[in-house]
Amino acid sequence: MSAKPFLYVVVCAAGVASEVGVLIRAAQAGGWEVGVVATPQALGFIDAADVESRTGYPIRSAWRAPGEPRPLPAPDAIAVAPATFNTVNKWAAGISDTLALGILCEAHGLGVPIAALPYLNAAQAAHPAYRQSLDRLRDMGVLIGTEPFRWAEALELLSPSRQGASPERGRAS
């Protein structure tokens, strides 16, 4: 088992998802071990072989069967990037209909630090449910990125100086 802190990168279906390797490389350079959890729709946007080669872990997208071993260690932090309109609104409402959303909903109860980098168009951002969802996520302690979308902002938001603790503080249960 690695002594490095473990970062889950939750990837949603948006055009920039194909560039998730930028965040993976930056996190690894910053001392994180990384595993990727993709929404089912995001699988069509990313190069699974490249991501798995970079991380050394399979991409998770579906629940495991009872009795199957956990393919990823517990997260020390989570970066949701890109965070789509759909994911932001379902997550804030407590909807857990995909593995990615299930992990995000549980992470709040486990106290796992989370940074989300929204990526959506102006028409979606103008919807009142989206603003309410962002407010709810902030109230839950989720760190929300700003525009324009920058992969590095996820790590900046999760940095020890922002969290008040070292990323080595210990794994979530």
Image (cartoon, rainbow, N blue to C red):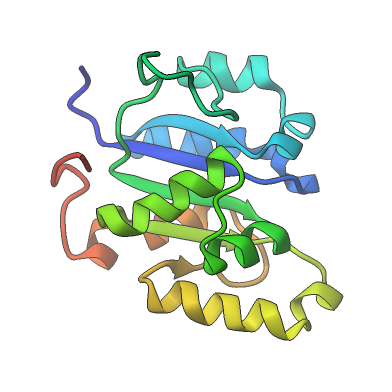
Q: Is residue 147 visible?
A: yes
Left or right? Give the position of 139 relative to 125: left
User: Could you tell me residue 9's position as x and y percent?
Assistant: 50, 41
User: Could you tell me residue 61's position as x and y percent?
Assistant: 60, 30
In the image, is residue 72 above or below residue 151? above
User: Could you tell me residue 24's position as x and y percent?
Assistant: 51, 34
Residue closer to the observer: 134 or 118: 134
* Residue 120: quadrant of the picture: bottom right
In the image, is residue 147 above or below residue 117? below
In the image, is residue 6 above or below residue 169? above
Q: Look at 36% across and 14% down and name the residue there.
A: 67
* Residue 109: quadrant of the picture: bottom left
Left or right? Give the position of 172 relative to 107: left
Q: Look at 61% across and 46% down and name the residue there.
A: 97
Left or right? Give the position of 56 relative to 121: left
Quadrant, the N terminus:
top left
Left or right? Give the position of 104 relative to 77: right
User: Could you tell me residue 100's position as x and y percent?
Assistant: 55, 43
Residue closer to the observer: 21 or 140: 140
* Residue 117: quadrant of the picture: bottom right
Q: Is residue 18 visible?
A: no
